[in-house]
Amino acid sequence: MTDTLNEAPAVEGIVLTDAAAAKVRTLLDQEGRDDLALRLAVQPGGCSGLRYQLFFDERHLEGDVVRSWNGVDVVTDRMSAPYLTGATIDFMDTIEKQGFTIDNPNATSTCACGDSFH
Amino acid sequence: MRVLVATDSWRGPHAGAGLDSKTVGTALARAWAELGDEVAVIPMGAAGQGFGRCLEQLTGVRPLCPELPPAGSDRWSASSRPLADYLREAAPAGTQGRVLEIAATPWRDGGRGACPAIEGPVTLVTTRQESERPLTGLRGLVSVEGRAEGMDPARMLSLDQQLCDWAQQLTGRPDAGTAPGTGAAGGLGLLVSALGGQVATGPEFLMDAAGAETTAAAADLIVTGCQELNMMTLEGEVVSAVTELAGRVGVPVIAVTATSSVSARELRESGLEAAMPLGASDAGPVARTWHW
C-alpha cells in the first residue's frame, strides 16, 4: 500500500477566501460597479512599523500583481507585494468579530489594534 | 585606573561657536589625569556636526565635504552632478580611498550624476538616519519621502522603478537598493556600495579609526556627554554610539554635561550609569567621585 502525499499548492500572491469573495461581490453589486478591484497595500507607519490599506480601486498601477478569486480581482502594488505573499483576506461575521481580516505569514508581530504589523 | 573620554561637542542654544569635542574631552581628561590616572581622548562628531574637524584632529586628513543646498521641491529631478564638479576640483588625484562627508543632499538620483567623478572605494560618512535608509522598496527613500509629500502613487512607483533600473545597471540586481544605507545622501550610498565602498556614521568611523574598541576594553571607565542632556540628546549620535561601545565591552559609562534633565531610570535604560551635570563647577569633583 502506498501513501499518497497531497501537497498543498504553493501559494503566491494574496488569497481571498470564499466568504471574503462573496462579501466583496455583494458590496460591488450594491455599488453597481464591475470595474473595481480589491486593493491590498502596505504602507510604512502604525505602531508596529507597517500598516495595511484595504480598499476598492479602479486604477491599474505599473507593476501591479493581480489574482482573481471567484470573479473578484485582488490587486497589490509592486512595493507592497513582497510583504504580502501568502497573506489571506477573510471575512468574519460573528458576534465577536465583523469585517475583513488579514492573516499574513510574513508578519512577525502585530499590535493590539490589529491595524499594524512588522 | 584607565579612563577613555569620547564626548560630543558642547554646543548650547547660547550664542557662540561652543566647544569642540577635543577641547571638552581634554578638559575632562585632565580631571582624571590630576588624580594619577591614565587617560585617552577620542574626538567625536556626527556628519555635519563636527565630524570633519574630529577626523582631521585624529588622522591629520580632512574629509571631502561639499557644501550643498537643502532638498527642495525639485529633489526628484535634481542631479548629483554638482558633486562631480566639486570632486574634480577638491580631489584632483582621484577619490579612491577618500572619505566623503555628506549629511543631506538636494538630489535623489542614486548618484547617477556624480558617477563619472567617483572611482574606486570611498567611504560615505553621513547621519545615522541616512546610514540606515534603503533607496528603493517600501521602506526606501522614494517611498518614505514620496508618501510624506502625498505623491501620486503612479509617480512614486515610476521613480522607484527608475532607481531599481539604475541599481540593476550598477550591480546586476534591481533590488540592490533595498539594502540599508543605499538610500543615504539621495541614493549616493547605492553608488558607493556598488563601487566597493562603505556607508558609515561619523562616530562609527572615528571610533574605528581610533581603535576605540581595544582602548575601551582596556578602560575602567568611559566618559561621554554633551552640552545639555535631555530625552532627545540622550539619543544623540555620539552619546548613543559611545554608550553602545561601553555596553559591548562591559565597561561603565557616564555622561558629563553642563545640564541634565534625564531621570535615573531613563539613564539606566539607555545604558548610562549616571549623568553628572557640572553646572558652574569644573570636573574635579566628578573625577574624584568616579575614581577608584
Image (cartoon, coloured by chain):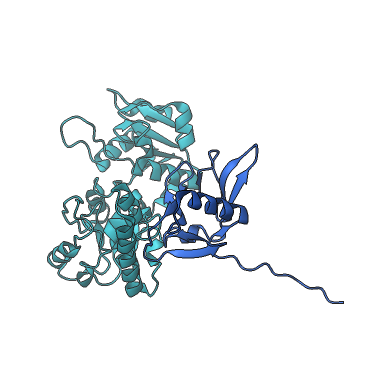
If the image is split into quadrants, where does the N terminus of chain A sit?
bottom right
Hey, which quadrant is residue B40 in on the image?
top left
The residue at the point 35 percent across, 49 percent down is: B129
Using the image as rendered, state which of residue B5 and residue B131 is in the foreground.
Answer: B131
Q: Is residue B32 left or right of residue A20?
A: left
The residue at the point 46 percent across, 55 percent down is: A39
Hey, which quadrant is residue B3 in on the image?
top left
Query: In the figure, B55 relative to A73: above or below?
Result: above
Using the image as rendered, state which of residue A100 and residue B51 is in the foreground.
Answer: A100
Query: In the figure, B53 relative to B191: above or below?
Result: above
Count the numbered circles shown: 0
Please state the horizontal and vertical placement of residue B168, each as a whole percent of the image. 35, 72
Using the image as rendered, state which of residue B155 and residue A109 is in the foreground.
Answer: B155
Query: In the figure, B6 relative to B275: above or below?
Result: below
Please state the horizontal and vertical placement of residue A61, each as a whole percent of the image. 37, 62
Hey, which quadrant is residue B231 in on the image?
top left
In the image, which lettered chain appears cyan? B
Look at the image and tell me whether residue B35 can be seen: no
In the image, which lettered chain appears blue? A
The residue at the point 22 percent across, 37 percent down is: B19
Please state the horizontal and vertical placement of residue A68, each as a whole percent of the image. 53, 64
Look at the image and tell me whether residue B224 can be seen: yes
Q: In this view, which residue lies farthest toward the right?
A: A1
The residue at the point 32 percent across, 73 percent down is: B170
Q: Is residue B54 left or right of residue B223?
A: left
Please state the horizontal and vertical placement of residue A21, each as a whole percent of the image. 57, 55
Q: In this view, which residue lies farthest toward the bottom?
A: A1
